[in-house]
Image (tube, rainbow, N blue to C red):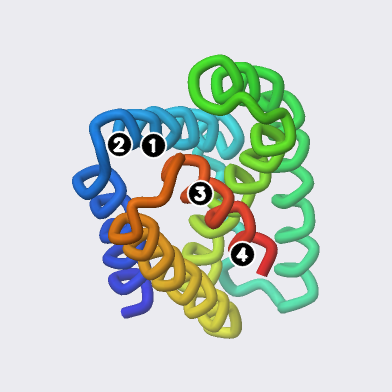
Amino acid sequence: KFKLFETLTRSFFLLIVIYGFSVETSGLFGLFIVILNLSSVFIGFERYISFQRDIVNKPPRIVQEQISDLVKFYLFNLLLIAPFFCMLVKFKLIDSPIIVFATLFVLLIEQLSIQIYNISIVYKEYVNLMIYIIVKYIILIIIVLYILYSNLENPFLLIMCSWILLGFL
């Protein structure tokens, strides 16, 4: 049931930005989502399928070790992908090197968010993390609606900064 709410809140967040803002802001955001999702594929290499299979019926200590190994796997791949991801974001979307670097954090958090669902299917102890993801998207929706109806300058940068900051919560 949480996956449905997570999908709904994430989709609503994406749809508000894509259809609510100007063509320029929507285009920049859409391009970022494409870069984010392509990079996510290169970081994960569909590892979540074999990981989910590997943790079934394992003791919690072994699962924790495998989660740690998975995070290391993602971090290693993130290091490999980071230069290409940052170049695309820098040259196509954002001038600020600090914000470009911070978008790597968004990439990692989104990758882990996908994995949290897969883990929570097998081990119910991780379901509470799905609630965090849903709350994060609800807060993002509220922020995006505020930015949209306040007609603030540089909405793309404000949306990105909000997404980055919420990743730290």
Q: Residues within 10 Å of mark 1 (few under 14, many from 20)?
A: many
Give the distance between the C-alpha atoms of the residues marked 2 and 3, in whole angstroms. Answer: 13 Å
The amino acid on which the numbered mark 4 sits, given as a three-letter code, is Ile
**Mark 4 highlights which residue?**
55
Q: According to the image, label 2 marks what residue?
A: 26
Q: Is residue 110 visible?
A: yes
Q: Earlier in the sequence, mark 3 or mark 4?
A: 4
Residue occupying image coordinates x 59% and y 84%: 125
Q: Is residue 63 above or below residue 115?
A: below
> What residue is pinned by disc 1?
29
Q: Amino acid at mark 3?
A: Leu
Q: Secondary structure beneath disc 2?
A: helix
Q: CA distance from mark 2 to mark 1?
A: 5 Å
- Residue 22 point in image, percent of width and height: 25, 37
Examine the image and state in which quarter residue 84 appears: top right
Q: Which of marks 3 and 2 precedes in the sequence?
A: 2
- Amino acid type, mark 1: Phe
Q: Report x, y in % for residue 94.
A: 56, 28
Q: Tell me the tag on residue 158.
A: 3
Q: Is residue 106 left or right of residue 7?
A: right
Residue 12, position in %: x, y? 27, 60
Q: Position of residue 72 (x, y in %)?
A: 78, 46
Residue at the spot x=70%, y=20% of the render?
Answer: 83
Residue 162, quarter of picture? bottom right
